[in-house]
């Protein structure tokens, strides 16, 4: 089998590797219907996160169950399934509390940019669709594996409620789907931060009411202007840089909520400033598994179409071009079809 392997900065190869198989009785293997390149794949691709050995890439997946281990009860071969980038047992105390991405037995899923994938803890991780979906629905279902679930968590963590004023920092796929999530949750006003024309357009399509192009403290000043000097009720931080995090916290009104889902790179917070913001901070790796059943319903019933974030579709063996296009910001998100 050929699969995607990252060797070092800007060195992505689609090459022969061992085909995944059932190792533990709780495993399943999935024939991938579609995979994609994640914004977080760009951190090691750019050399910001070091790569010390060749790494199989890809953690967003959906497809048909090929084989299950002897202990797997909830899914069976032939079913179409979606799972989170963190495999979880869905039974431990953290899972029960809805934080499956902190599962006591969590395992990072890797190697999804390939035709076949092994998923550990299949019973706790995978959720099946009512039936095998039409091909046109596959991109939207794929987003539930990470980006859409992460955008939804950002909005949930930021306590988006009907009528509230929301700011979304970040115009990558997660930020754009954070806009869609906030709209779905009934936000009154959604201010998207973006300088990029095609992303602004999609943000508006997903429900943004205002676009702010300024970043950092200029961006904060602009949001204060738009909110009558009060700040936003809910702010979604979907980048992970110091500037984005501070823009998010400083845009939050006293008593408001900042949900942060951008993986932090070099972010440092000052205790004294935090103390006086009166902001609720909540974030981390999204517990995608918690949201999967509801998000599958929303896609299945045509209420949301998050698959619109894919503006580039490539055959799996052209995966390197997908990384390049996203790195150069020519594409918002690259869809890979085997
Ligand atoms: Zn667990």
Image (cartoon, rainbow, N blue to C red):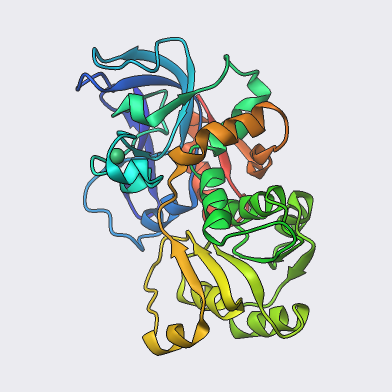
Q: Is residue 107 visible?
A: no
- The residue sitting at 53% across, 68% down in the picture is 258
Task: Give the total of numbered labels.
Answer: 0
In what quadrant of the picture does the N terminus appear?
A: top left
Q: Is residue 266 visible?
A: yes
Which residue is more in the foreground, 220 or 162?
Answer: 162
| Vertical comparison of 66 with 161: above or below | above
| Vertical comparison of 183 with 310: above or below | below
**In the displayed structure image, the side of residue 245 where residue 114 appears, left or right:** left
| Vertical comparison of 67 with 139: above or below | above
* Rendered location of residue 225, percent (x, y): 75, 83
Residue 176: quadrant of the picture: bottom right
- The residue sitting at 21% across, 18% down in the picture is 25
Which residue is more in the foreground, 273 or 176?
Answer: 273
**In the displayed structure image, the side of residue 159 where residue 104 appears, left or right:** left
Which residue is more in the foreground, 232 or 168?
Answer: 232
**In the displayed structure image, the side of residue 68 where residue 209 appears, left or right:** right
- The residue sitting at 72% across, 81% down in the picture is 222
- The residue sitting at 57% across, 15% down in the picture is 132
* Rendered location of residue 113, percent (x, y): 42, 33
| Vertical comparison of 206 with 235: above or below | above
Residue 117: quadrant of the picture: top left
Q: Quadrant of ligand 1?
A: top left
**In the displayed structure image, the side of residue 53 where residue 212 appears, left or right:** right
Residue 139: quadrant of the picture: top right
* Rendered location of residue 314, percent (x, y): 57, 33
* Rendered location of residue 46, percent (x, y): 41, 59
């Amino acid at each position: 089998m050929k699969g995607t392997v990252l060797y070092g900065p800007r060195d992505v190869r689609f090459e022969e590797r061992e085909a995944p198989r059932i190792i533990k009785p709780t495993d399943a293997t999935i024939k991938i219907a579609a995979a994609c390149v994640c914004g977080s794949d760009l951190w090691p691709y750019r050399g910001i996160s070091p790569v010390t050995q060749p790494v199989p890439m890809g953690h967003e997946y959906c497809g048909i169950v090929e084989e299950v281990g002897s202990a797997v009860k909830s899914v069976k071969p032939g079913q179409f399934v979606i799972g989170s980038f963190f495999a979880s047992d869905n039974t431990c105390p953290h899972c029960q509390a809805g934080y499956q991405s902190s599962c006591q037995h969590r395992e990072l899923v890797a190697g999804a940019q390939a035709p076949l994938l092994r998923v550990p803890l299949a019973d706790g991780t995978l959720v099946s669709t009512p039936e095998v979906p039409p091909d046109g629905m596959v991109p939207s279902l794929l987003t539930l594996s990470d980006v859409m679930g992460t955008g939804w968590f950002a909005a949930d963590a930021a306590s988006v409620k009907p009528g509230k004023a929301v700011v979304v920092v970040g115009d990558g796929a997660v930020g754009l789907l954070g806009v869609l999530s906030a709209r779905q949750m009934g936000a009154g006003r959604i201010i998207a931060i973006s300088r990029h024309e095609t992303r602004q357009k999609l943000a508006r399509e997903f429900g943004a009411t205002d676009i702010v192009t300024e970043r950092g403290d200029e961006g904060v000043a602009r949001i204060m202007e738009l909110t009558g000097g009060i700040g936003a009720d809910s702010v979604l931080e979907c980048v992970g840089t110091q500037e984005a995090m501070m823009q998010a916290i400083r845009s939050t009104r006293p008593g408001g909520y900042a949900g942060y889902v951008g993986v932090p790179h070099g972010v440092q917070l000052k205790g004294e400033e935090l103390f006086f913001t009166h902001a609720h901070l909540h974030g981390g790796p999204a517990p995608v598994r918690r949201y999967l059943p509801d998000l599958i319903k929303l896609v299945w019933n045509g209420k949301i179409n998050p698959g619109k974030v894919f503006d580039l579709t490539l055959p799996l063996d052209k995966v390197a071009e997908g990384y390049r296009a996203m790195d150069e910001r020519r594409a918002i998100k690259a869809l890979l079809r085997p």
